[in-house]
Amino acid sequence: MPTLLNMQDVALKHIMDKLDYLSVQCLRKVCIDLRQSIFRINPESTLSVFQLDLNCDSIITTLRFKDRTTKITYKKHETGCLMKWTGADGKIMQDSDHVEVALHDAHLLLDSKNFGALDRFSLTTENQSEDILKFMENFESYMKTRKNPLKVEYFSMHASCQKHLLNILPFVNPTGLQTLDMDFFKDNGEKLEDFVLDKIVKSDQWKNSKELHSAKLFLETPLHNFKHFKKVYIENTNLTIDMFEELKEAFLNPPHKDYCQIKFDHFNAEQSLIDLYGSPFLTGFLSNKAWFFGIDSENVLSVRLNSSFIVFNVIDEEEVPEGANIIL
């Protein structure tokens, strides 16, 4: 009678493909021969979301598979590492370092994505403790040495240290990367150092992405670095008339953008807009003032301005409100 140990790899792979990640992990622990067979086959998992939250004394991993979401907490304990799973009692791993245990499991989880892409990769660091620095350095080494660069559609990283961005982003597969969501976890007005900014905006990951979400990370970054994005959500301390014109031209000329939202603290050039383009159309919602610029026979650039936001958005001509002028 055939057993898992004497099955051909093809048959064993078919069985592995029917199991979720946690079931495969249980099989790894049966015996060394089965563990080696699973390592050799390296079945593709249904993992779609991988989220890491690094705190001063714990690491939380949130995983989403096809049919379940699981959260695993690795907490520093006086005798080792305390592990807790969703819906299960905690387990103390004696004489184990919680950072090393979390790293080991993260490697196994991400190694299970051989060819498919994660829908979302998310990493948050709350501070710059010794444990977090240790995790980031080791995780960077892992990302560098992966056989296949990790494929991700949505890359999110909110860091307490801007250099942490360079631990991970440069080693993500730029092909298929759709969205970058990057920021500082702490709001202290710190801006990107020149060498960090230079590495980010020159990276293939930045150039290939279609959408950018960032609060204060790119406060003083020149706008030309954002022109290739189809959608942009950023903050900028001071919005100027020159920035307005630069963004408007980026939307009116190919390759056309879809959407740009900028949150600002100061904009003192509203009268200059009125002098250039006439009185705005008042929408009544959030005291929005709007101007509309013709792009072609079907599309119009809508620019909406209020006390905190300016939004550039391409709309169909038929969506222009009745009574509003289209500036050609």
Image: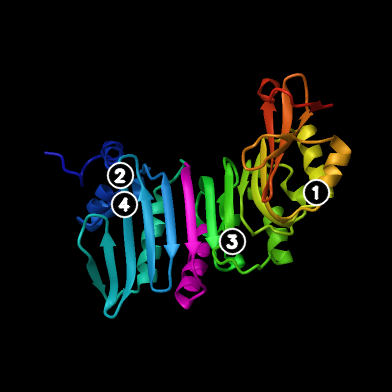
Q: Are marks 4 and 2 in contact (CB under 8 Å)?
A: yes
Mark found first going from the N terminus, 4 or 3: 4
Determine if residue 149 is in view: no
Depth check, mark 1 against mark 4: the one in front is 1
Q: Are marks 1 and 4 in contact (CB under 8 Å)?
A: no
Is 308 left, or right, of 279 in this rendering? left
| Region rendered in magenta | 117-144
Residue on which the image places disc 4: 70
Q: CA distance from mark 1 to mark 3?
A: 27 Å
Residue on which the image places disc 1: 243
Residue on which the image places disc 2: 68
Residue drawn where x is 39% and y is 48% of the image: 112
Q: Which of 40/195 is in front?
A: 195
Determine if residue 16 is in view: yes
Depth check, mark 2 against mark 1: the one in front is 1
> 316 above or below 188?
above
Membership of 258 in magenta stretch: no
Residue on which the image places disc 3: 165
Question: Which SS class for mark 3?
Answer: helix
Residues packed near mark 4 inside 10 Å, few (<14), some (14 to 19) or many (20 plus): few
Question: Which SS class for mark 4?
Answer: strand
Q: Are marks 3 and 2 in contact (CB under 8 Å)?
A: no
Considering the image in quadrants, where does the C terminus appear?
Answer: top right
Q: Which of 79/304 is in front?
A: 304
> 322 above or below 95?
above
